Amino acid sequence: MSKKRLFYVIIAFAAFWALNVSLFPTPDVAAEKITIKAISAWGKNHSGVKKDYLPYIKHANEMLQAKYPGEAEIKYIGGAETIPIPEQPEALRKGQVDMYYGTAAYYAGVAPAANTTKLSQLTSQEEKDVGADAIYDEIHRKLLNATYLGALGSQNPFQLYTKKKITSPDQIKGLRIRTSAMYVDFLKALGANPVATKPGDVYQALERGVVDGVMWPLDSIRPWGWHEIVKYVTGPPFYKVSHPLLMNAKKWDGLPKKIQAVLMEALRLEVIAIDARTIKDIENEYKEMKKAGMQVVEFSPADTKKYLDMAYEEGWKGQLKMEKDYTAKLRKLISK
């Protein structure tokens, strides 16, 4: 074949190839769907998981599907039945799970300052506005390899419940109160005798007189049946239930910005709904406890101030014993 003829053959083949590519382009390879493995400290029937976490996952997935169909999904894999509670923070750190919903009390040994959320006197949005969320994110990234998305939980407070009528903080002295590490310092300052008892054993402990009362979140005493024995809702509510929503830092940083934005917007909307609902839930819970035969006992204004001042002072003192730098910064931001 002559060089001239070969040249024309090459030109013809190139033209044919270009025409086929333009008419029949190679289909794009679909990007692999992003799956976010989500876990909770408690099972799906826990009030926080059922009312806050699972709805967040549902709404976030709906928003993701509407804006970016098929690109990303949160997959709830379970609670403590999937990974035991003590092992969950480490599983998050290692990236064995991507998202975590629980309480900072469960990893306070690793990141003690994270547990100051219970002492916050601000709403979740206010915490973000004053810069507290940025500090919590720094804490979690440094010590848990996680990013702090925000608090996903109600402003539901804690309350003291007693078997006998107590009309002032001074009368708490000497009482045996079921406690947890969360408020043991407060009880000691009141002169009470803290008693560590598993939630499942509290009913029997109350019934047998092992304890005279219990401190517990306001909205969940009746499911345990304790209202059958403790008949007094004593003094003002204090602290608050706060459930951090965390993600493995590497997983979060690897998400496209648009996916991050949807997850944060879903969280913002969920928190607004939770905060609005919580006010009604607290009012309804007091009504239900009264219907169940319980009596709400209010302290005098002076005793109320004394009680609450002591609660927060002792709470912060306890936190400062475990960690100083972050705790001192947060105290200035989230106290009133």
Image (cartoon, rainbow, N blue to C red):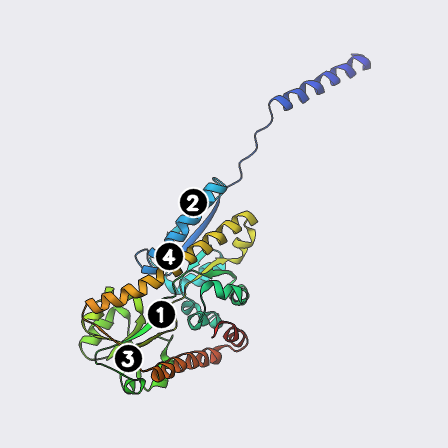
Mark positioned earlier in the residue sequence (1 or 3): 1
User: In this rendering, would 271 be left or right of 44?
Assistant: right
Mark positioned earlier in the residue sequence (4 or 3): 4
Q: CA distance from mark 2 to mark 4?
A: 16 Å
Quadrant assignment, res 214: bottom left
Mark positioned earlier in the residue sequence (2 or 4): 4
The amino acid pointed to by label 4 is Asp
Mark 4: secondary structure: helix
Which residue occupies the foreground of this view, 6 or 204?
204
- At label 1, counting other C-alpha atoms closer than 10 Å, the crowd grade (few under 14, some 14-19, many 20 or more) is some
Mark positioned earlier in the residue sequence (1 or 2): 2
As drawn, the label of residue 62 is 2
Mark 2: secondary structure: helix
- Residue 105 at x, y percent in the picture: 41, 69
- Residue 320 at x, y percent in the picture: 48, 79
Relative to 272, is 335 above or below?
Answer: below
- Residue 8 at x, y percent in the picture: 77, 14
User: In this rendering, would 47 be left or right of 228?
Assistant: right
As drawn, the label of residue 17 is none
Tag nearer the camera, 4 or 1 = 1
Q: CA distance from mark 1 to mark 3?
A: 17 Å
- At label 2, counting other C-alpha atoms closer than 10 Å, the crowd grade (few under 14, some 14-19, many 20 or more) is some
Residue corresponding to mark 1: 157
Residue corresponding to mark 4: 52
